[in-house]
Image (cartoon, helix red, strand yellow):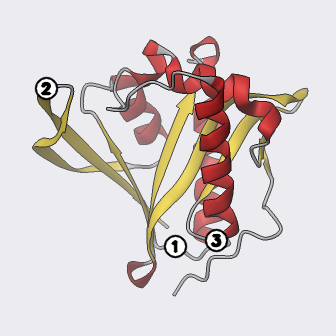
Amino acid sequence: MPQLNFTPFPELTTDRLLLRKLRKTDANEMFFLRSNEDVLRYLGKEPTVTIKEAEEFIDKINKSVEENESILWGIAMQNDPSIIIGTICLWNFKKEHYRAEIGYILNPGFWRKGIMKEAINSVCDYGFNVLVLHSIEALLSPENIASSAVLESTGFVKEAHLKESFYFKGKFGDTAIYSRLK
């Protein structure tokens, strides 16, 4: 069974990216990511309203990492590691089933550059080889064609389409479930 231990924090690198722990100094970037209409379009989450909320989110995430409940990396370009351009996480661990959920967001200025594909592959490699997961799942809106495409390009397969499985802002929405096996 997977044993989660995120101390010390596992920084990951790819050809272009540094996946690192969030810091308080990332609050402005987190505020942008969690309040931008384009980023939130398919997430079913209320936008962050203040920088203080972004700081509280960073604290909440880092506490969850310290307690080995989930892990979230800030995505930065290696040539400018101080600026977060997105996040990617493994969470909702089902240790007894060797399974976790992946989630991610990216600044729209960096869309369609292969960045999320790089980050997903790196995080899946970590999940399969370090955490000994057997499968990683992703839940998303079926309307999010770009996210479906990046998942498929990284080896994820659509497993299910749940009709009206969540309620947000006065309406029900569908959920697509993708997974990737080790």
Q: Marks 1/3: CA distance?
A: 19 Å
Q: Is residue 21 above or below residue 35?
A: below
Rendering quarter of residue 141: top left
Q: Residue furthest right?
A: 79
Q: Which residue is mark 1?
A: 133
In the displayed structure image, the side of residue 115 where residue 166 appears, left or right: left
Badge 1: few (under 14), some or many (20 or more) residues near its Cα, within 10 Å? many
- Badge nearest the viewer, 1 or 3: 3
Q: Identify the disc placed on residue 4.
A: none
Count of labels in the image: 3
Q: Amino acid at mark 3?
A: Glu
Q: Report the mark closest to the observer, 1 or 2.
A: 2
Give the image location of residue 179, x and y in percent: 36, 55
Q: Amino acid at mark 2?
A: Gly
Q: Is residue 114 visible?
A: no
- At 58% from the left edge and 33% from the top edge, which residue is drawn? 53
Neighbour tally class for label 3: few under 14, some 14-19, many 20 plus, Cα within 10 Å: some
x 57%, y 62%: residue: 70
Task: Give the alpha-carbon distance from disc 1 to disc 2, as whole Å.
Answer: 36 Å
* Residue picked out by circle 2: 170
Q: Amino acid at mark 1?
A: Leu
Q: Residue at x 66, y 43 (%)?
A: 58
Which residue in the structure is indicated by mark 3? 67
